[in-house]
């Protein structure tokens, strides 16, 4: 069958739309071409024109109810708190069960209540970075290592701390797993892995900011023999082997592959030792030395 008149083309389109409601425009076009042997260029143009119209009006008959609109309004408000930005239509759709197209339509319709607008790439990246820092803060607080990290280092740190202190339930369910004290790759308190709930809103290449370590540092020696590791890579990329001494946060104390290096006793110069000994003797005798030696024949004035 070949569509010789314009009115045949829309009939074909509607027929295939009805028969295959879940197929997208390209697949419908391919089926119509193959089954109806449409090869003529002008006929293909007519087919494409009607397909564009049909799929453009895909949601034309969708009418949002008051309940649907309220669901979208509440979803937008909640997701904005979680993601720290306006949600994408796909994210709204995941929560409401509507299609992304319908979600966007209702979100635009109700934006006077929510202030919703489509987030661009810059907004998505900025929000992902802020969210990641908030989740790192909360995870370090959970693992009792928060005091060891500097949260006055960056300009937006006050905002990060304020958001974290809100203690949003959804954020607490998105916290990363941190590197434990018996790890041999990074400093204690760094991110080891993210849960899927967090990755939904973070960029694929997101990495937490490097922060100054504020905790106590100790010197450790990598053990040799049983229980040792082949190598250790510090946060700055320096590699150490068994027997080497490395300075690490106190949280590493107790790791089986490390031993604490006791500081060598401080030796004072002989002159300082003699002065200290003399000071001790004078204190025992309760004698106050004269500032200057009295001249011969000079009378001592009583105070």
Image: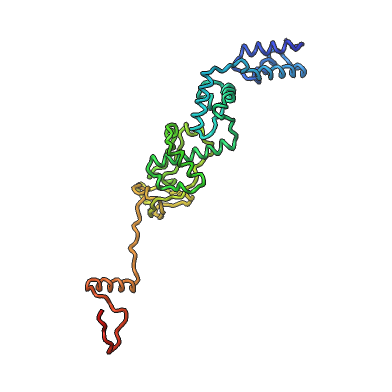
Q: Which colour scheme is used?
A: rainbow
The percent coordinates of residue 147 (x first, y second) are: 40, 47
Residue situated furthest left in the rendering: 285
Examine the rendered structure and indicate whether residue 70 appears above or below residue 188: above
**Can you tell which quarter of the image residue 218 is in?**
bottom left
Depth order, front residue of 220/78: 78
- Coordinates of residue 192 in the picture (x, y in percent): 44, 40
Residue 299: horizontal and vertical position, in percent? 26, 86
Q: Is residue 265 shown above or below 166?
A: below
Image height of 125 relative to 1, above or below? below
- Frontmost residue, 180 versus 226: 180
Q: In which quarter of the image is the C terminus?
A: bottom left
Query: Hey, which quadrant is residue 47 in on the image?
Result: top right
Percent position of residue 37, x then y: 72, 14
Task: Please name the residue shown 54% across and 26% down the image.
Answer: 113
Q: Which residue is drawn at 48% across and 50% down?
A: 236
In the shown orientation, is residue 209 left or right of residue 142? right
Quadrant holding the N terminus: top right
Image quadrant assignment for residue 20: top right
Q: Which of 111 and 56 is in front in this view?
A: 111
In this rendering, the answer to whether 81 lies above or below 284 is above
Q: What residue lies at 55% left-to-right and 31% top-to-bottom?
A: 86
Q: How many labels does the image show?
A: 0
Determine whether, in the image, residue 164 is placed left or right of residue 285: right
């Amino acid at each position: 069958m070949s569509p010789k008149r314009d009115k045949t083309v829309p009939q074909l389109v509607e027929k295939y739309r009805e028969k295959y409601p879940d197929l997208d425009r390209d697949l419908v076009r391919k089926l119509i071409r193959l089954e109806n042997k449409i090869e003529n260029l002008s006929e293909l143009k007519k087919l494409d024109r009607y397909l564009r119209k049909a799929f453009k009006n895909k949601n034309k008959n969708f009418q949002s109810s008051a309940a649907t609109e309220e669901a979208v309004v509440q979803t937008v408000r909640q997701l904005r708190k979680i993601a720290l930005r306006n949600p994408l239509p796909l994210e709204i759709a995941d929560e409401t069960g509507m299609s992304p197209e319908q979600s966007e339509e209702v979100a635009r319709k109700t934006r006077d209540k929510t202030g919703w607008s489509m987030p661009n790439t810059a907004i998505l990246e900025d929000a992902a970075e802020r969210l990641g820092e908030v989740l790192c803060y909360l995870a370090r607080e959970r693992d009792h290592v928060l005091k060891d990290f500097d949260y006055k280092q960056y300009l937006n740190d006050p905002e990060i701390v304020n958001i974290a202190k809100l203690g949003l339930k959804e954020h607490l369910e998105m916290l990363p797993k941190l590197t434990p004290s018996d790890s041999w790759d990074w400093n204690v308190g760094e991110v080891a892995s993210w849960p899927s709930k967090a990755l939904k809103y973070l960029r694929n290449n997101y990495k937490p900011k490097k922060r100054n370590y504020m905790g106590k540092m100790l010197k450790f020696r990598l053990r040799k023999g049983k229980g040792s590791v082949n190598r250790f890579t510090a946060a700055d990329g320096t590699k150490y082997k068994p027997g080497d001494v490395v300075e690490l946060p106190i949280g590493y104390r107790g790791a089986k592959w490390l031993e604490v290096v006791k500081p060598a006793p401080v030796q004072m110069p002989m002159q300082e030792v003699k002065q200290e000994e003399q000071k001790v003797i004078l204190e025992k005798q309760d004698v106050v030395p004269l500032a200057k030696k009295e001249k011969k024949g000079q009378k001592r004035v009583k105070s």
